[in-house]
Image: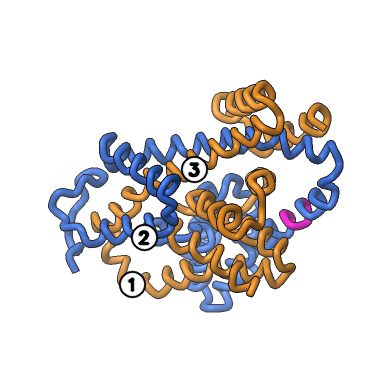
Amino acid sequence: MIYWEIFLAFFIPGIVGYGGGPASIPLVENEVVDRFGWLSVNGFSEMLAMANALPGPIATKMAGYIGYQQAGIPGAFVGVFATVAPSLILMIVLLGILMRFKDSPKVKRMTSLIRPTIAILLGVMAFDFFRTSYVDSGVWQMIGIAVVSFVLMEKLKVHPAFVIVGALGYGAVFLG
Amino acid sequence: MKQWHIFLAFFRVGMLGYGGGPSSIPLVKKEVVEKYKWMDDEEFANVLALGNSLPGPIATKMAGYIGYRVSGIVGMINAVLATIVPTIAIMIILLTFLSSMSEEPWVQGMTQAVVPVVGVMLAVLTYDFLKKAKGGLGWIITIVLAVVSLALIEWAGVHPGILIGVLLVYALVKPDKDVGDEKGQQKEGASS
């Protein structure tokens, strides 16, 4: 039963998540936090921070870890399989057909039509994270960390992995 | 030997690609086109275009298809595993270690400090998606779709998968004439 739930939780983001792994982040959150309740918003953010700090595709790191956490190695396998297999099979099977239509406006329109929806999902998640941070650490810590990390990542182009490691260090010393 | 090369190529891609699948595309190209010459530029561009028009993570679609092209089902499995297994293993080890000490105050401090950082990352990603949507759809449609999505998902409780599915079907079914899509590419072969 748990394996079926893990399969469903990652099958849906895998099959509706257009635009690569990052677009599927809010869909995964919807399943594992809101629907199945496997992680809290805090737990999810911790996992996402770690996943962002490590190399490799983001969708499979989330599926592997959450699957493992819920049901060990077989759970990790099910989560990754559900993420990867449906889209990969589609890719191989449909290659010949879709190759002919890759410049078709319909296919391009599919990608662009869902972007505002994905943006809203991401925006809502960002809002949830800031609210959680406000509740747990207070408004000044939240604003301070957010502003510093924004300047470092977006203006000074510091690699996110270093910013996350820095935040972890800061939290361990000053928020503990 | 070929399997070993497939493994090496995608292992490097997985370990060096920060920021999720889309950021690893140039790395895949370097291995597949420049180093091992399994494909030429044009074929790679075609695979990428197709990969982008299908759902699901891009990195594993690329790895799986290229592995399959180079040496069948075994190559496909090899390439996908090489892309994802090393980083999943690191992830599980690190997070299991952290959560085993989740009661320690310093670990809780770490969690708290990292939440706003992730918030900033998501806000930036939100902005990127809105900007790209504007490029393809124009501001008005982007804003209308964004507001409607917000209302449906947050207040009406519609599952985001259903909403996205409806939008995708609409994009397929809608007649082609009044398309507001990117630049004037040719519209041949879209009607079947």
Which chain is painted in blue?
B
Q: Label 1 lies in what chain?
A: A
Q: Which residue is mark 1?
A: A96
Q: Amino acid at mark 1?
A: Gly
Q: How many residues crowd around disc 3 within 10 Å: few (fewer than 14), some, or many (20 or more)? A: many
Residue B91 lies in the magenta stretch: yes
Whole-number angstrom distance, CA of label 2 to CA of label 3: 18 Å
Question: What residue is at 55 percent from the left and 72 percent from the top?
Answer: B76
Residue B68, how many percent across, how many down?
Answer: 50, 73
Q: Label 3 lies in what chain?
A: A
Whether the residues at callouts 1 and 3 have beta carbons within 8 Å, the answer is no
The secondary element bearing badge 1 is classed as: helix
Asked if B153 appears above or below A14 in the picture, the reply is above
Read off the magenta span: B90-94
In front of the other: label 1 or label 2? Answer: 2
Asked if A54 appears above or below A8 in the picture, the reply is above
The one of B157 and B191 positioned closer to us in this rendering? B157
Q: How many residues crowd around disc 2 within 10 Å: few (fewer than 14), some, or many (20 or more)? A: some
The one of A110 and B24 positioned closer to us in this rendering? A110
Res B39 visible: yes
Res A83 visible: no
Question: What residue is at 59 percent from the left and 33 percent from the top?
Answer: A130
The one of B21 and A15 positioned closer to us in this rendering? A15
Which chain is painted in orange?
A
Q: Label 2 lies in what chain?
A: B
Q: Which residue is mark 2?
A: B165
Q: Is residue B30 left or right of residue A37?
A: left
Q: Which residue is mark 3?
A: A122
Question: What residue is at 64 percent from the left and 30 percent from the top?
Answer: A134
Q: Amino acid at mark 2?
A: Gly
